[in-house]
Image (cartoon, rainbow, N blue to C red):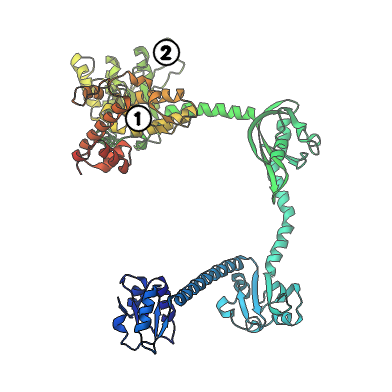
Amino acid sequence: MIVGAGKGGTAILKILKESEVLKVHLVIDRNLDAPGILLAQQEGIKTGTHWQPFLTENIDIIIEVTGNDAVFQEIRNAKKKKTVLIPGSVAFLLSKLLEEKEELVVKHQNESYQQELIFNAANDGMMVIDNHGTVILFNKRAEEIMGVKKDEAIGKSIVEVIPTTRLPLILKTRRIEANQEMLLGNDRKIITTRIPIIEENGTIIGAFAVFKDITEVVNLAEEITDLKEIQTMLQAIIHSSDDAISVVDEDGRGILINPAYTRITGLTQEQVIGQPATADISEGESMHMKVIQTRRAVRGVPMRVGPNKKEVIVNVAPIIVKGKLKGSVGVIHDMSEMKSLSRELSRARQIIRTLEAKYTFEDIVGQSDEMMLAIEQAKLGAKTPATVLLRGESGTGKELFAHAIHNASDRKYNKFIRVNCAAISESLLESELFGYEEGAFSGAIRGGKRGFFEEANNGSIFLDEIGELSANTQAKLLRVLQENEIIRVGATKPVIINVRVIAATNVNLEKGIAKGSFREDLYYRLNRMPIHIPPLRNRKEEIPLLCERLIQKINRDYGRNVEGVTQAALLQLMGYDWQGNVRELENILGRAIIFMNFYETLIDVHHLPELKNKKSGSELSLTNTSESFTLAHSLSEMMEGYEAKIIQQTLFRLNGNKTLTAKTLGLSVRNLYYKLEKYNLEKNSMQ
């Protein structure tokens, strides 16, 4: 019987449970949740809360583990004479010994595991036998080379595993046999070293063998043989490069240059090989010497080299072999060639910008219902050849939609011509759109000129500010839309074209029809698929995402690293009406980033002075409510009040959906719940 089922009692129970000599009859403890009680119940051993009722049973040994002297005395007085009583101190000692045993076992297991990892990670085969010739260690590489599984080798005589082994002889001679060739039964040759394992007192306890497949040694010899061929190939590659290459040793003396180096610098091998690294420099510091001193690469360093003081850009890197500096290699780029290529690239980019659409629907930021509707309509229109009329205020992104529609259509691999009808004078617009014949008017170039419509054949043409066209141009445009043909200025023969027209306007065409400034028949041709792009003030929930996208663009343009907008500044941005729409937002953010210090990474309220004195419509509406702010309130109080107003309005508009509200406002759900509680808005929200 065990009295006390705490830590000591549990330890004693574990020991006795594994014993075949003694059997635990019952476990006693006042606490039925004691670990010893729970363990006894799992093992099917009786349990109880008091020892006295069980003294009548046939119990040989009582182990008292409560640590209470009074309990020990009571049991000693009440037990039978033949019953042995063991005090808790003895039980405690046993439990401590058990804990130490378990710790030692765990430690031994960890050390064995680590040794096993190291043993198996070796690239050489290894095996160990004891003084009786029995295999006790056999690593994975030994399995591969010998063709014997570890389980088949461990515990067996080494002669059974490898009949030709000399390890038993090593046990007798106690001599080391190094780098010996050995033939295995599978016709494989190995190089092996055999070592006896001898204790300090001279007792031999085993032998150890480490071996390598000789085929690996042969392969290594072949690699060394091929080094000369590889060196020849590398020299051929270096000499074929159009970039100038020079190599110096660890002392900074030239050891290799290629023909391109001579061509660019004008220096021959005799003037460079064996000479100091400064021999080729006309202006500037030797980058070879700097790299040798610092062991760090340098890139994009301008300097002048050779007798002609050639302007070049230099990249130099150290040559480090097995941790030792062996020299450095430099690549020289001719700046005159790079400048010429840069000019050609700039010209090509300018041409490409006029002939291709740059944006897709993925570049359009839209979360509001109105914007999503406009995007879906535009995607639908892109799949048809129908004329599209983009309507919306200035700065809402009509040209962005035009680009996206072209890129989503089957004409995306053809030209995309953009024309601002308000930017070209009325006298030139007709000839620019439809082209002209030779001699059509004074100043006409010889051979005539193709117009924008002919340039856009099989592609798309974007006519921005379509409401600014003159009556005469409107009539010609109507013919293009009806007949798919144009007539050049000064010509009589029509030219058949296949062009998709995307028009845009920020004026009310219906009023133009009423005033007689816009043709009604042209309006019906253009208005076949109208797409209304909502102003920014109607979709303010998109301002956080728009800010993120615009800041990324401005960072690329200005070479800055601004990360975002603070919450206070975001509230101020969302409180403004944005009469100039997204274009005005980009203007405000760009101006803020220009005047920010380089160490600043977030746009804050003080970076937006333009908005401080501008009162938006939403702010005006706040002043007319019972929650109006007066000058008696501090800035932080007014900002918090306005923040609460925005959260409440957004939550109401989204039917109480907190997850969508948090996403719309750029908050985490947890932060939104915090603000709802802070501003006492929880009771007004809808789940």
Q: Is residue 577 above or below residue 156?
A: above
- Identify which amino acid the numbered label 1 is placed on: Ala
Determine contact: label 2, label 1, CB under 8 Å.
no
Side of 684 where 426 appears, left or right: right
Residue 8 appears in which quarter of the rendering? bottom left
Q: Which mark is residue 439?
A: 2
Residue 230 visible in the snapshot: yes
Residue 397 visible in the snapshot: no
Crowd rating for badge 2 (residues with CA inside 10 Å; few <14, some 14–19, many 20+): some
Secondary element under disc 1, as helix, strand or loop, is: helix
Residue at the location (73% across, 25% down)? 308
- Identify which amino acid the numbered label 2 is placed on: Gly
Quadrant in the picture for the N terminus: bottom left
Residue 112 appears in which quarter of the rendering? bottom right
Reading the image, the residue beneath label 1 is 568
Q: Nearer the viewer, mark 2 or mark 1?
A: 1
Secondary element under disc 2, as helix, strand or loop, is: loop
Residue at the location (53% across, 29% down)? 345
Q: Is residue 102 above or below residue 256?
A: below
Whichever of labels 2 and 1 marks the residue nearer the N terminus, that label is 2
Side of 113 where 272 appears, left or right: right
